[in-house]
Image (tube, grey):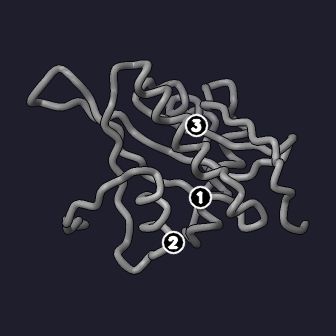
Amino acid sequence: MGPMPPDLAIRTIRLQASDETLARQLFLLLAEIFENQATPLSSRYLQRLLARADFWAIAAFTDDLLAGGLTAFTLPKITSESSEIFLYDIAVHPNFQRQGIGRRLVTHLRHAASSEGIDTLWVPADNEDQHALDFYHSLGGSAAPVTIFTL
């Protein structure tokens, strides 16, 4: 499959509990792109995860082909009665990169979150990943120096 034409029709949807098959495909795609080991998820686990109001799984399609997606979590704040979104994973299949799909995914998340009164979205990016840094800057993001620890 070669590069897609510039007038690529992109459709994004937030996956729900009834979208188990699509979620499996999306999660496998994310694991493949990030070169992560993935263990099969049970139907019960997937349906419970997708049914959570604080979990976001947004898939992007070109025609009927899964082109990419993201996962994110709503985090309630303790300093005000509000929440923020933590964008956990976002990836676009290599055959569909540089076509506006990543931008469309983030735009979908921002608009959907905004309709729920959530205006702040944050995402970690490795300092060595210049492509990711450029992408988030192009979306109007501002970098904040931080170190994330894994315990």
Check disc 2 and give the amino acid type: His
Q: Nearer the viewer, residue 94 or 107?
A: 107
Position of 93 compared to 107: left or right? Answer: right
The percent coordinates of residue 84 (x first, y second) are: 29, 35
* Rendered position, 85 above or below 99: above
Quarter of the figure with residue 19: top right
**Residue under the image location 49 percent in, 61 percent down:** 135
Look at the image and tell me in which quarter the N terminus lies.
bottom right
Cα distance between the residues tagged 3 and 1:
20 Å
Position of residue 120 measured from the top left corner of the image (x, y, whole percent): 31, 37
Q: Amino acid at mark 1?
A: Ala
Nearest to N terminus: mark 3 or mark 1: 3
Q: CB of mark 3 within 8 Å of CB of mark 1?
A: no
Q: Earlier in the sequence, mark 2 or mark 1?
A: 1
Disc 3 versus disc 2: nearer the observer: 2
Residue sitting at x 68%, y 36%: 12
Q: Which residue is mark 1?
A: 91
Which quadrant is the C terminus positioned in?
Answer: bottom left
Q: What residue did someone put label 3 on?
A: 46
Answer yes or no: do the residues labelled 2 and 1 have beta carbons within 8 Å? no
Q: Secondary structure at mark 2?
A: helix
Numbered circles on residues, count: 3
What is the distance, in whole Å, between disc 2 and disc 1 at their CAs? 12 Å
Inspect this view and state whether residue 103 appears.
yes
Q: Which residue is mark 2?
A: 131
Is residue 25 rendered to the left or right of residue 16? right
> Which residue occupies 81% across, 55% down?
6
Picture coordinates of residue 45 (x, y %)? 54, 37
